[in-house]
Image (cartoon, rainbow, N blue to C red):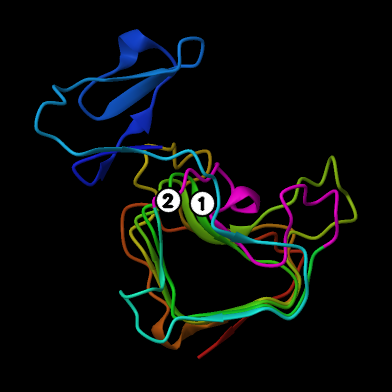
Amino acid sequence: MIVVDGKMLAWVTTRGAVDEDSAWYDSGNSRVYIGINPSGKTIEIARQPRCIWGAVNNVTLKAEYLHTFGIIEAYASDAQPNRAAVMPGRSTSWPHDPDGTGWLLEGLEIRSNAGAGHCSGTTDTLRNSRVYWNGQLGMGSICDSGDFPTVLGAEDPVIDNVECLDNGVGGWNAGWEAGNTKWQRSEGVIVNASKYILRGTHNHLNFDCSYLVRYQQ
C-alpha cells in the first residue's frame, strides 16, 4: 500500500501504466515507482497486512475515546474480507483453521486500509464504529465454496450502529468486487440498521441468498 499526501494510490501491473494516481512495485529490485515528483510530499508505504486477528475466544476491545486510540489505519490488507485489516477470531491461515468466537469490538475507526477493512467471523460483534475510505471493501465475509464447501464465510455476526461509507477508493473494479460491504456464504448476519450508512459510488449489499440475513431497525 502506498499513500502520497494522504491519497491512496492504485497499484498497476507494469511500469508503463503508472500515472499520477497509481504506482508499480518492482519486486525484483524492491523499488516503488510513482507518476509524480516526490519532492516535498509525504509518502507512506505499508507492508503489515492486518492489525487485529487471532483464533481465540471471547476477546473484548473497546476504544472509549474515538480519534484517540481507536483508529485502525493504513494497513496493507489484501483484497477480500477474509484478508482484512481487522479479522476478529481468525488466524492468518483461516479457513484451514477454525474460528475463535465471541469477540466484541467497539468504538473503532477502520479507515484507509489497502484492501478490506473488517471481516466478520463467528458470533462476533462490531459496535459503535465507523468503516470508511478502505481501498477495496469496507466489511463483510467470504469463503470460497469450491475449496471449502462446508465452511461458512461468517456465522451469527452482529453489526450494531456502524457507519459504513465511501469504501472502494483504491481503484478496484466494482464489476468484480469493490464498495462498502459483501457477505457471501454467511449465516445469521444481523445488521442493526439504526445508523447504518451507505454512501459513495459503489454501494453493494451483496449476500448469498441461500443463507439467512436479518436487518433490525
Please name the amino acid that badge 2 sits on. Answer: Asn
Task: Name the secondary structure under disc 1.
Answer: strand
Which numbered dot is residue 113?
2
Instruction: Give the magenta-colored segment's residue range.
Output: 74-98
Rendered residue at 30%/27% (across/down)? 22
Rendered residue at 48%/43% (across/down)? 76
Q: Nearer the viewer, mark 2 or mark 1?
A: 2
Vertical arrangement, residue 79 with respect to residue 111, above or below: above
Please name the amino acid that badge 1 sits on. Answer: Ala
Q: Which residue is mark 1?
A: 116
Rendered residue at 43%/88% (across/down)? 194
Q: Are marks 2 and 1 in contact (CB under 8 Å)?
A: yes
**Magenta stretch, main secondary structure class:** loop
Q: Residue furthest left?
A: 40
Query: What is the quadrant of residue 152 in the picture?
Result: bottom right
User: Residue 19, percent across and down?
Assistant: 24, 20
Which numbered dot is residue 124?
none
Residue 94 highlighted magenta (yes or no) = yes
Inspect this view and state whether residue 158 appears: no
User: Residue 156, percent across and down?
Assistant: 73, 77
Rendered residue at 68%/53% (across/down)? 142
Query: What is the quadrant of residue 203 in the picture?
Result: bottom left
Q: CA distance from mark 2 to mark 1?
A: 7 Å
User: Residue 195, percent across and down?
Assistant: 40, 84
At label 1, counting other C-alpha atoms closer than 10 Å, the crowd grade (few under 14, some 14-19, many 20 or more) is: many
Inspect this view and state whether residue 21 appears: yes
